Image (cartoon, rainbow, N blue to C red):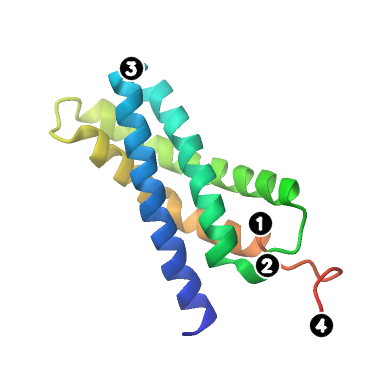
Amino acid sequence: MAELPRQILSFAVAGIVGFAVDLGVLLLALHCGLGFFLGRSISFLAAVLVTWQINRHFTFERGRDQEVQKEWWRYFATMLLGGCFNYVVYSLVVLSFPKLWLLPAIAVAGGSLAGMSFNFVGAKLWVFKPDPIRSPK
């Protein structure tokens, strides 16, 4: 399989796993009384940690030639920017449809789709971009 389609598919799989983690942690946070917004902040961080591990080991393994801490902070910054798109859509759904059946799942899914394209481009072109100094030519 060509590299770009494989990366897109792998990124999508990581996103599905991230969605499951995000929703699971959010439901746990809601059960603990943290509310939709604080709970989502915590669940988003958990999802970012999980997707970083998947993406660094499976999606962009050829771009992993930088320090782990540097990679993490780049990934977190990129996902945080994409997370802004994600959080806006999530918030709009929560505030617009408070009585919607399956509200947490629908809101998380809508937000995730909104941030996914930005996150993929940022991860591919900035986070996991091979370092020309450290990469063999």
Front-most of residues 53 and 111: 53
- Label 4 to label 3: alpha-carbon separation: 52 Å
Sort mark 1 into few (<14), some (14-19) or many (20+) by Cα contacts within 10 Å.
many
81 left or right of 32 in image: right
Q: Is 129 situated left or right of 34 in this image?
A: right
Residue neighbourhood size for the residue with mark 3, other residues' Cα within 10 Å, grouped as few (<14), some (14–19), many (≥20): few
Residue drawn at x 46%, y 58% is 117
Residue 103, percent across and down?
Answer: 21, 33
- The percent position of residue 129, horizontal first and vertical second, equals 69, 65
For marks 4 and 3 on the same chain, the one whose residue lies earlier in the sequence: 3
Question: Residue 85 is drawn in which quadrant?
Answer: top left
State left or right for residue 34 relative to residue 72.
left
Residue 3 is labelled as: none
- Residue at (19%, 30%) from the top-left corner? 97
- Reading the image, the residue beneath label 2 is 63
Residue shown at the point (72%, 51%) measured from the top left: 68
Residue beneath label 4, please? 137
Q: Which mark is residue 127?
A: 1
Q: Are marks 1 and 2 in contact (CB under 8 Å)?
A: yes
Mark 4 and 1 residues: CB-CB less than 8 Å, in contact? no
Q: Tell me if label 3 and label 2 are in contact, CB under 8 Å.
A: no
Q: Nearer the viewer, mark 1 or mark 3?
A: 3
The reply to whether dot 2 and dot 4 touch (C-beta < 8 Å) is: no
Q: Secondary structure at mark 4?
A: loop
Mark nearer the N terminus (1 vs 3) = 3
Q: Tell me if mark 2 has few (under 14), some (14-19) or many (20+) residues whose alpha carbon lies within 10 angstroms of its own.
A: some
- C-alpha distance separating marks 4 and 1: 19 Å
Q: Earlier in the sequence, mark 2 or mark 4?
A: 2
Residue to which mark 3 is pinned: 32
Q: Nearer the viewer, mark 4 or mark 3?
A: 3
**Kind of residue indicated by mark 3:** Cys
